[in-house]
Structure formats: structure tokens, C-alpha cells
Amino acid sequence: MHIHLINPNTTAGMTATIRDAGIAIAASGTRVTASQPDSGPVSIEGHFDEAISAVGVTEEIMRMDRESPADAYVIACFGDPGLLAAREITRAPVIGIAEAAFHMAALISTRFSVVTTLGRTVIIAEHLLDQYGFSHQCRRVRAAEIPVLDLEDDGDRALEKIIEESCRARDEDGIGAIVLGCGGMANLTETISREVGLPVVEGVTASVKLAEALVGLGLSTSKVGDLAFPRAKTFTGQFSHLSGL
Ligand SMILES: O=C(O)C[C@H]1NC(=O)NC1=O
């Protein structure tokens, strides 16, 4: 099977980190590819960045479905930008890394905390916890206070701060697991788990395994109701190419 990972920000180095983590966890019969939009924010650190990146996510899925259809798609940003829109435009399963990580964490612990990047994005994870129905199991969404691209540009310091915040969560939150709140943390799972002494759930790898399960079960996105393909209509301006889809 073919799983395609989409990094919604436009930083190729982070796409490579995401891709390598996906390849490492994939089953022997699974081919993992990855891409990022040509246009959009180099990092996603708030509501505005999320909104802009959602267009790039849907464009990437439409491009792949035209050129090299995947059996499943993963949106590899912890805000799950464009998730439902993406599910409308393809038959393949589409998994957001936050939703996947919450499900996996809930299967191995009764309480978990999330450690993400900047404090201003905490509310985004809190909104998703509420939307997906995991608020009662998540004790707290914490921020290591690192800009997203520090994961690429200042990795050692970023890792140190993520571990520090994860240890505070372990000591203060009464939890059994940690969820990593950024696609760019996809290569840090084992190190953080070893240093903190708790199971660590990371969304990219969780998504790949969930995608394998869905495809293996022969399940795809329902085209009945709200996730049916969009109603054909005229689009104007920079989106005119979407007319009549
Ligand atoms: O929301 C965040 O802090 C993390 C999110 N931003 C990004 O560019 N990739 C992500 O996973």
C-alpha cells in the first residue's frame, strides 16, 4: 500500500523528518512518500497560518489523486489543518496527526498531556481535544516555548526544552503518557520517552499505523453525507481552476 504524508508548512527539511519517521515505522509492504505545498507558511504557529495552510493541503491531495493516488493521506501538522475539507475531496482515508495521537494515547493511558511548541498554539490543540472528544482524558496542553523551525534549526536546544516540559507534565499532571504536539517532533519519540520515563505518542507514526489499519480493513472515507465530493460550482480568481470539480 501507498501512504502519502503531507507537511502543511513549506519547509522541506521538516518534510524530510516527517517522511523518514513514516518510513521507519511503516510495515514492509507499505510505501511512504511525503510532500509539502509550494505555497504557504514556512511554519504553522497560529490560526492564520493554519487557515492558509489548509488550502495547500487540499491542493496537494488533489494533485496526488491526479498524478499518483495514495491509498491513504496523512496531514502532518498538529492542528490537523483542512482535515474535513481533505476528506471531502478524496475517497482515500485522510488522517490528522493530532486526532491519531489522541486516539492512540487514549488506548494506553487514562490521562495524558500534550507538549507542543508555542503557548499561542495551545488553544488549537485544546479545540481539537474538545472536537474529537478527548478533553476528559487530556490533563493539560503544555508548550515548550520553541518556534516550530527551531526543531530544524536549533534541534538540541529544542529537544532539551521539550524534555524539560515533558518532565514537568510527568511530575505535575498525574498522567500515564505524553503526546508530542508537532509534526516536526516525529524523530524525537524514543529519546523523549527514554529521558522522561513515560510512553510517548507521536502523531506522524501513529497516523501511519492507523492508515495501514484502515486500508487493511478496506475502509475509505464515506461519500455519503457531509464528506461527499463538493458540489460543483464556479470558483473565481486564484481558485478558478477549481471550477466544476
Ligand atoms: O502547531 C504547532 O505548533 C505545530 C505545527 N506547526 C507546524 O508547522 N507543524 C506542526 O505540526
Image: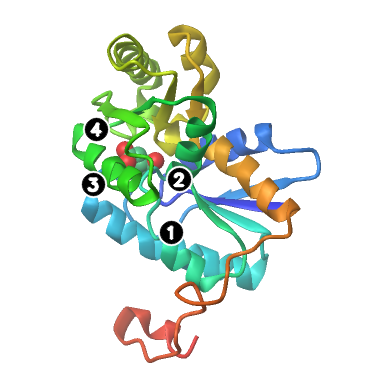
Mark positioned earlier in the residue sequence (2 or 1): 1
Q: Nearer the viewer, mark 2 or mark 1?
A: 2
Give the class, few, some or many, for how many residues have Cα within 10 Å of label 2's Cα (few <14, many ≥20). many
Amino acid under label 3?
A: Gly
- Is label 4 in a helix, a strand or a loop? loop
Look at mark 4 in the image and give the residue it sits on. 118
Task: Return the disc, 3 or 4, that comes first in the chain's sequence.
Answer: 3
> Disc 2 or 3, which lies upstream in sequence?
3
In the image, is 160 to the left or to the right of 97? Answer: left
Q: Position of residue 72 (x, y in %)?
A: 63, 56
Q: In the image, ligand 1 is in what quadrant? A: top left
Q: Position of residue 81 (x, y in %)?
A: 37, 55
Residue beneath label 2, please? Answer: 99
Mark before the other along the chain sequence, 2 or 4 = 2
Residue 241 shows up from this direction = yes
What amino acid type is highlighted by mark number 2? Glu
Q: Quadrant of residue 93?
A: bottom right
- Image position, residue 169 (x, y; %): 31, 16
Residue in the image at 47% along x and 48% along y: 7
